[in-house]
Amino acid sequence: MNTKKIKTAIIVMLVIANVFFIYNLYMLNEKTSKIPQQMIDDAVIILNRNGLTVSREAIPDTKPQNFIYEGVYSQETFEEIVRSLSESEITNTYPMAEGRLYTAGEYSFEFGRSVIEDPLDYFTVNFSLDSADSSGKNEVEADYEDGEDLDIITGNLIAAGIKGYKKVDISRAEKLIAAFLKKYQPGTVEFETVGFQKNADSEYVIIRQKLEGLAFDSHIVFVEISDKKIRSFSGKWFFGEFTERLKMPLFDSVNILFKCLEKDGNVIEETERLEKIELYYSLVWHEKYNENYREKYKFYLIPSWRLNFDSGKELLYSTITGDKPVNN
């Protein structure tokens, strides 16, 4: 008996079996994670016939696989953030009409809140390193400290983007920001750099918060770095862990377009064309309650669809219900 030939045949059979197994896994993944191409082609024809003008290229074929997150925010949360990021005990607390100001170590922290106590503003934060040297300010730094609207500065940096700067400089700034945030935010700190400027003394970075690869709606932060320290951090950012992570079936892009036609077809003009449909995380506040006489807010992060039309119109939908516009 030629054992060598038998061994070779067995190896060949095992290789074929593995290839077949991998192919089946790939096909199964394609079926579960992708919308069939024919379904998208048919949907485009039907949608256009019924008044929703859309091209095939504008429709993502990947099905959403993200989780729904539940979280809780409270006064204790802010205090934990202050202690952790400053690595010091809180020395002073100042209640204000539009939030609360803390000082701890070299840092001051301000958590924003509107006069009517809209809980959404609890994610607005501004903290700064009080002891930073104020000499040698460049134009951006001078404008920021002289009170120019930070939204304008942020917008200008986003418009300028990150082109023209070395990847190593941007990567160094991102690592510093991530290391700083990990002091309080456990796990992976996800963000995308959308603006960057560097001079001899400082770096200015605009970051957008992300989770599972999806951007948070409106969570944009201006970061100033000098002497390898975070000097200021201003914008909207969620810190901390979530209390629960839920997996639910989510409406894909094709189904959400039909929901859009059903619910909002009467507000879409015939001349409007859908330019882009994108998935992102939206914040939905659930309830305000008291636990041991301390005020707490429960909220959810929900994957949601944003439909952008060439007219500038935006329509927002939850991936959970499909027919319910997202309350941001």
Image (spheres, grey):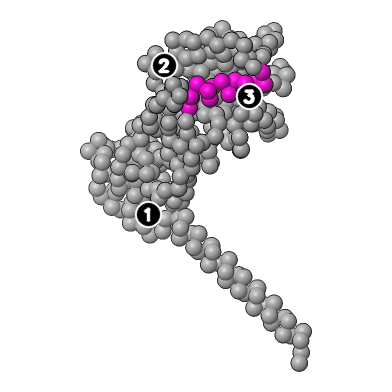
**Tag count:** 3
Q: Name the residue carrying label 3.
A: 84
Badge 1 amino acid: Ile
Location of the C terminus (image quadrant): top left
User: In the image, what residue type sits under mark 3?
Assistant: Ser
Q: Position of residue 259 (x, y in %)?
A: 30, 45
Q: Secondary structure at mark 1?
A: helix
Instruction: Please report the bounds of the magenta region as a residue range.
Output: 73-88
Q: Residue furthest left?
A: 266
| SS assignment at label 2 | loop
Q: Earlier in the sequence, mark 3 or mark 2?
A: 3
**Which amino acid type is marked by label 2?**
Ser
Q: Looking at the image, which is closer to me, 26 or 267?
A: 26
Residue marked by disc 1: 40
Q: Nearer the viewer's eye, disc 1 or disc 3?
A: 3
Residue 114: numbered disc:
2
